[in-house]
Image (tube, rainbow, N blue to C red):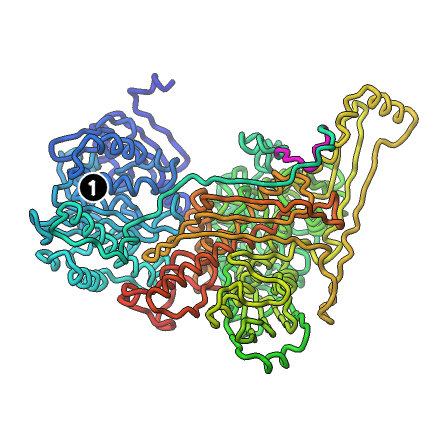
Amino acid sequence: MADENKGRTLVFHGERTTWISPVSLEELLNLKATYPNAPLVVGNTCVGLEMKLLDVYHPIILHPVRIPELHVADVGDNGIVIGAATNLAELRDILLNLVPELPVKKTKIYQALLKQLRTIAGEQIRNLASLGGHIVSRGSAWDLNPVLAAGKAILNLASADGTRQIPLNDEFFTRVPEADLSPAEVIVSIFIPFSKENEFVSAFRQADRRKNALSVTNSAMKVLFQPDTDIIEDLAVFYGGIGNTTVSARTSCLKLIGRNWNEQFLDEACRLILEEIVMSPSAPGGKVEYRRSLLVSFFFRFYLEVLHGLKMMYPSKYADVPKEYMSALGEFHEKPPQGMQIYQDVDHHQPLQDPVGRPIMHQSGIKHTTGEAVYVDDIAPADGQLYMAVVTSTRAHAKILSIDVSKALEEPGVVAVVTANDIPGENGNGKEKVFAEDEVHFDLGFLSYLENSPLNADKQVIYIGHIICGIVAETYECAKNARSKVKIEYQDLEVILTIQEATEHNSFLSDIKKIERGNVEKAFHTVDKILEGEIHVGGQEHFYLETNSVFVIPRKEDKEMDVYVSTQDAAKVQELVASVLDVQANRIMCHTRRVGGAFGGKITKPSFFAAAAAVAAHKTGSPVRFILERSDDMLITGGRHPLLGKYKVGFMNDGKIKAVDLEFYINGGCTPDESELVIEYVLLKCSNAYDIQNFRSRGQACKTNLRSNTAFRGFGFPQAGLCAETWIVAVADQLGLPHDKVSKGRARRLGASNDIPGENWPLSWQTHAFALVNIYLDGSVLVSHGGCELGQGIDTKMLQFLNINAKNVIETTYFLQIKEAYEESISLTATGYFKGYPTNMDWEKGEGHPYPYFIFGAACSEVEIDCLTGDHKNICTDIVMDASFSINPAIDIGQIEGGFIQGLGLYTMEEIKFSPEGQQFTLGPDTYKIPAVCDVPEHFRVYLLPNSRNPMAIYSSKGMGEAGVFLASSVFFAIRDAVAAARKERGLSANFTLDSPLNIERIRMACADHFTEMIPRDIPGTYKPWAIHVD
């Protein structure tokens, strides 16, 4: 078929768009003359995103990928010509083959391009995105455009009227008419010249993550010297990530021509660049002062590279780069991570057929890898299936005055609009609603009514993302498109977003919780010194691979429904769906085969999504599939609680801590969810493994107009533990002592190690368990249990228990015994129940026994930081964990490693950004960065402590799912130590606090230097920030 269509123009007609793929340049130019506003799309990596995220509509799209002239790669006398449709991976390969064949002096621009191509996007995107598309889209963060502009690339244009050339420069980027394409023109190819003998070219970029992330700021710089001198003949400096497109410091460069390349030139150049390249304090993307610092930090690195290059070219003519600057010349180079896992083997007397304690592979591991594992959205469509998309609030706090859904109902394929009025039972669980409800006038075109429900005394939407109604349609695309047709009128109310605002307005979700021992006030009067401070810990997205997914199939009798749902708690789903539909729980069958990741994020919220889909199925009588897109999932559901921790520590001059007073606030969002349990966890674990004789901790969960934060792996301890280590470090710095010399009672902190006081729930009913075992006549066994397979391997461990007697199963006598028992009417079914651990906690008295056992672990990490950019590299991490007897060392170590990497994201990278109005900006992988392979420590070793036992649990084991998260704080404090060393070199104070996440911005700005002092500073309160901190 491909051969048949090779020489034919292909035309595809969609509902709104026509896609045309011409086969010749002439045909393309004629089409462009006919449709001048039609975009050219090769990889669809830019236009596709605009259409999806910004609802940009193009009636005609031209796909020129089959035109030979757009794929040329010719080497000429003065440079190379690359076709505009060449994808970035092909460009990289062309340059890799070309550079070794040319003199070094000619390849400097090409080497700068290769440097950026190593990290730009991911390989999948590089295989699709074209060079021409990269140029013409003129994205601010595009890494190649500054290099091409600095290298004076030329664009070869063509139209039906002829051909011409334009320079790729700042005027092109800012769309000056005479320097830009006309609507009928296309870029056919790009000419990239050879570099010259006395020319130096460098490229730089800094992103939130080193790979597969858009640049926060990038740059390319080129200088041409007069022959055999360091006198500047030409200078070009371009930056990306600063404005709406690539910007040039053209004026500064012109003023610097004729200057010598020395330190006086450097100071003047930095000053001129900062004067010319101006950023608004409200600039999109935030990190404004950090980005300003990169303007001069990048130029300083360029200055040193050129200085080093001059020295290499003329050894006797120029001085060496000063020794203290040599480290600034180096950049981080990636090495594949290497791991080691060490664990105690099973007793040599254990039978070979007994798999308990052995590193058995995850029973679905191959299915996960090949894509054969079936998740909710992989279930085949049911007859008459409909799809649902939800309409959410665009206001953080408001009354809904009216909702007009008439236009949505007129859309082809739309079957119904589902609201709170369609709920036959209770709208929610008493704390949170399935659909927002108000005294609202709904205009359905043919029907109008007032919905006035007494269930919601507040009668308002309480966060951006609050579900108002659902659109049910024959296709998901139809339901999604119809959402924009729903018109909602709001009356805005006062908005509370941050912990500070919540405390000022006395807005809380829980009463004050308190734990106290000893006499704290008296102890403060006996110490030599008292230190007070605070630390902010940001939130974190769960970012599970499978978003919240529900598939509801109504049965044809007795109001029964099958609910296929991705959840950690199917019982809660069943309970809420039954309540919402006003039926008995036994009419609702919940099915959860496996969950594509959860980390706590699928405990409470799936119930509400399932209930919404069930209401839609009840109203329409049809199966309803409700799969959240990533952006909707991140908008509607909450994550880890942002935390503010305040501390007051009393200590002696020898480092002995005698009194600690702690105060915690967490941002719970708009509904209670799990926030009260989380603040209890924070208080119970906030002393970490340290035994402080006079100790007090208090805490509250704040109510704000953000999505409701919920359970997350570690359940408050990663935040509380970081606070504990912070005040330990603060005391050590105050006294000028090594951190391990600070005495905290019976436990001591060793180097960069961290101890963890375990996991498990402080309420026994949350740890109860049950199982049903059926033996079939063919000898096979089916086990139903109350756990959910989240990828953590619970089903694998269950199989290990079952296979203890696997040898007997295959013996003939086993089958005879089964048959004989059946014939004698002996039950082949058994049940088991575990009522939970004997735990208790009396919060009125502030005492109890909340945990049945503890997990102990330590981690030591080594890092390297780049003081000029704030980047860091994880060199080595060693973890020792007391797992007692590991039922499956492979799975347990995998849980420890996975938890550590998730903690690495929490402490060093992941940021949730909100506007001052409460709009979340981070709604997908393009704006929210989790750790990738490049962030895994180059040497990553995990050691399970041998000969340890836990009499409280089955097989003397321990749960390893959460403990690894906090151990990533060893990286946080290793970075802090590196920052402290840099500050010490510069004569800066050793007493400083770093908040979490300790990202590139915070690292760079803490490594204060001459360049951070040069940049303009903005006074808080004098401008509206792009984003706010809600912790």
Q: Residue at x 40, y 40 (%)?
A: 335
Residue 611 visible to an observer of this rendering: no
Q: Which residue is drawn at 63% across and 77% down?
A: 520
- Taking 733 as reference, is 462 left or right? right
Could you tell me how many numbered marks the image carries? 1
Q: Is residue 166 magenta?
A: no
With respect to residue 135, does 861 lie above or below? below
With respect to residue 997, does 470 lie above or below? above
Q: Mark 1 points at which residue?
A: 109
Q: Does the magenta stretch include residue 360?
A: yes
With respect to residue 564, does 5 lie above or below? above
Q: Give the image quarter of residue 707.
A: bottom right
Q: Where is residue 693 in the image (x, y as percent from the top left)?
A: 65, 71
- Taking 165 as reference, is 9 left or right? right
Residue 127 visible to an observer of this rendering: yes
Tell me if mark 1 has few (under 14), some (14-19) or many (20+) residues whose alpha carbon lies within 10 angstroms of its own: many
Front in this rendered view, residue 559 or 799: 799
With respect to residue 464, does 3 lie above or below? above
Query: What's the magenta region?
Result: 353-361
Q: Where is residue 170 in the image (x, y as percent from the top left)?
A: 19, 50
Please state which amino acid type lies under the numbered disc 1: Ile
The residue at the far right in this view is 824
Task: Provide the secondary structure element on which disc 1 rests.
Answer: helix
Q: Where is residue 476 in the image (x, y as percent from the top left)?
A: 51, 40
Q: Residue at x 74, y 48 (%)?
A: 953
Q: Where is residue 463 in the image (x, y as percent from the top left)?
A: 53, 60
